Image (cartoon, grey):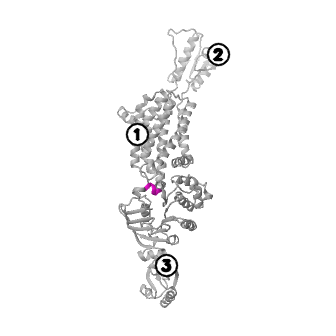
Amino acid sequence: MADHPLWQLTLVRFREFLREPEALFWVFGFPLLLAAGLGLAFRNTPAETVSIGVVGTEHAAFEQAPSLDVDAFATLEEGLKALREGRIALLVERPEADAVVYHYDDTNPQGRDARMRADLALQQSAGRVDPVAARDELMRETGSRYIDFLVPGLLGMNLMGGSIWSMGFAIVDARRRKLMKRLVATPMPRHYFLLSFLISRLAMLVVEVGAFLAFGVLVFGVPIRGSLALIAGICVLGSLAFGAIGLLLSSRARTVEAASGLMNLTMLPMWILSGVFFSSQRFPDAVQPIIAALPLTALNDALRATMLQGETVAQILPEAGVLAAWLVVCFPVALKLFRWR
Amino acid sequence: MPEPVLRVRDLRKAYQDVVAVNGLNLEVQAGECFGLLGPNGAGKTTTIEICEGLTARDSGELEVLGLRWERDAAALKQRLGIQLQETQLSEKLTVEETVRLFRSFFHKGPTAEHVIGLVQLEEKRRARVGALSGGQKQRLALACALVGDPDLLFLDEPTTGLDPQARRQLWDLIEEFKRAGRTILLTTHYMDEAERLCERVAIMDHGKIIAMGSPRELISSIGVEHVVEFSVDADAAGQPLDAEALSAIEGVRDVRADNGVVRMQVTALHSAIPKLLAELVRRGIRLTELRTHSATLEDVFVTLTGRHLRDG
């Protein structure tokens, strides 16, 4: 076992990867940083409180009002000064017990908002009863936030990049260094060489996907509603499809530059079109069939459907079919074209 | 006569615009170290890579260890040790990991530790390949060629680019393999390497073998024992020197002038040198340099082609 060529070749893959700190960062660290950054930027914040001012000490009416922050001012002048300086959005003046004057800038939405809240609080505390009973139902459900949309998309993008890069770079580099030619001159079975990439890729996947999903769940509370086995299955299928594409892209290239050009050319349209950062539905209807046929679209859609909607195997069959088709077409073509020296 | 280990008949290989190998015949016997000597571009690497099964030939017969690549590739690969020109092994692996990897491809052979000892890299066992010197890398490449206990060892320019000390160290190793009875085919463009290591040498030029034999035989075949090279003070007055006058000296042949250096082959050094000096004195010419050496394979190549090996 320890001296089986497939095991030795797979060990080489791991050693080369783990001894390359940059690669470690791009595969494991970067996606986490990206998710953290975007999650912070687009986090859902609670409704803001508005500062208002009250002239005199009579402000008990506003204490109970939600989202109002009340400052008391001794004189009208002091209150107006605070309003002009923008420290408060509204100044409430009570010239008489049954009268109220609101000072505010009606072109400022915050001022208008404060005026309505303050008036409502005042009228209700004075005994007004609304003729229509109203009840608020708040829509802050997890699963519909931007971060929930983002995490499966980043996961898909990461699987694509990881598979294509790890395949392409190592293969072209081995070819450039004439290492591949040297290996081919030994009795090494050629399919072991390719298989070692596959095995190391799948093993890495466990860490990569596991760390990323755990981060999404623990830090942002991203829901995982579908079965974990199904999500794992989608990740494996996606990695195989992108691995085949990576193999195809690196089947002829003799230099890393040539290969990375091809890889970027392949991945860039998918970063934009396949719904990583925003929904692919935003593109015109005419191009939707093309977008739907892209492997990253299929992978992202399948991941979102299982993670966020809890869909089952039967419901994601179309996406799985697209991924399988890319695998079945690209792999044999890549083997046919592959330059072993 | 026993079966040759390697038999090549009328081998031909052309690339788009160059004929790399043009009708090559050779046989390597068991236990010998056979050298392909020639300048860069003579077709040595193409020839050895066809024998290694890495390059397809256009025509000709090729039998390695009595087997043929078309039929017996898997069996053949188990029995060959190959060292390619300019392979860069993975820099992130250690010496031991690299040898272990190559060892895993072969059914039989010594342990990785044993092979590392053979090439004297024990101290570097745990060192990364990227941290090795040129000579150590070349010895590691040799180790990777030895892991299958090969019946035939192919070495393609094993010492190119190494400093003199590393070259001598590698030569010592190869001589040890020879003593252990291994059969070796090596290519080189260093005539001293071929003379020191090879029982037989084939001199290649433009895809063909232009002379074959032991280094001694080849050198004596040109009928020259010594070579004299000298240059003269061009500014000093004196009667100009002409090749005809030099050729008239007894025992002198093949006079050539190249970049101000006159080079001539001499059969009897002890009588030719006094005569040369007398001739120079007579003409009032002052020597600035005078060298003599015993004839080498380089001189064989110069005699056969009119060019130096290093000129390519």
Q: CA distance from mark 2 to mark 3?
A: 118 Å
Callout 3: helix, strand or loop? loop
Residue A281 visible in the shown view: no
Q: Which circle's residue, 1 or 2, is located before the other in the chain?
A: 2
The chain to which mark 1 is attached is A
| Disc 1 residue crowd, few under 14, some 14–19, many 20+, Cα 10 Å | some
Residue A169, compared with residue A94, is above or below; it is below
Write the residue at 48% across / 34% down: A233
Q: Which disc is residue A326 wearing?
A: 1
Give the image location of residue A219, x and y in percent: 57, 31
Q: Nearer the viewer, mark 2 or mark 3?
A: 3
Percent position of residue A169, x then y = 48, 48
Q: Nearer the viewer, residue A115 or A270?
A: A270
* Residue reaching furthest to the bottom: B282
Tag 1's secondary structure?
helix
Task: Give, as a three-letter code, the residue at label 1.
Answer: Trp
- For the C terminus of chain A, the quadrant is bottom left
Label 3 packing within 10 angstroms: few (<14), some (14-19), many (20+): many
Magenta segment, prevailing SS (helix, strand or loop): helix
**Which residue is identified by label 2?**
A57
Q: Amino acid at mark 3?
A: Ala
Q: Pinpoint residue A234: horizontal percent, then vertical percent.
A: 47, 34
Q: CA distance from mark 1 to mark 2?
A: 73 Å
Identified at 64% across, 16% down, the residue is A57
Query: Dot 2: what SS?
Result: loop
The range drawn in magenta is B73-77
* Same-chain check, marks 1 and 2: yes
Q: Quadrant of residue B3?
A: bottom left
The chain containing the residue under callout 2 comes to A
Q: Nearer the viewer, residue B165 or A79?
A: B165
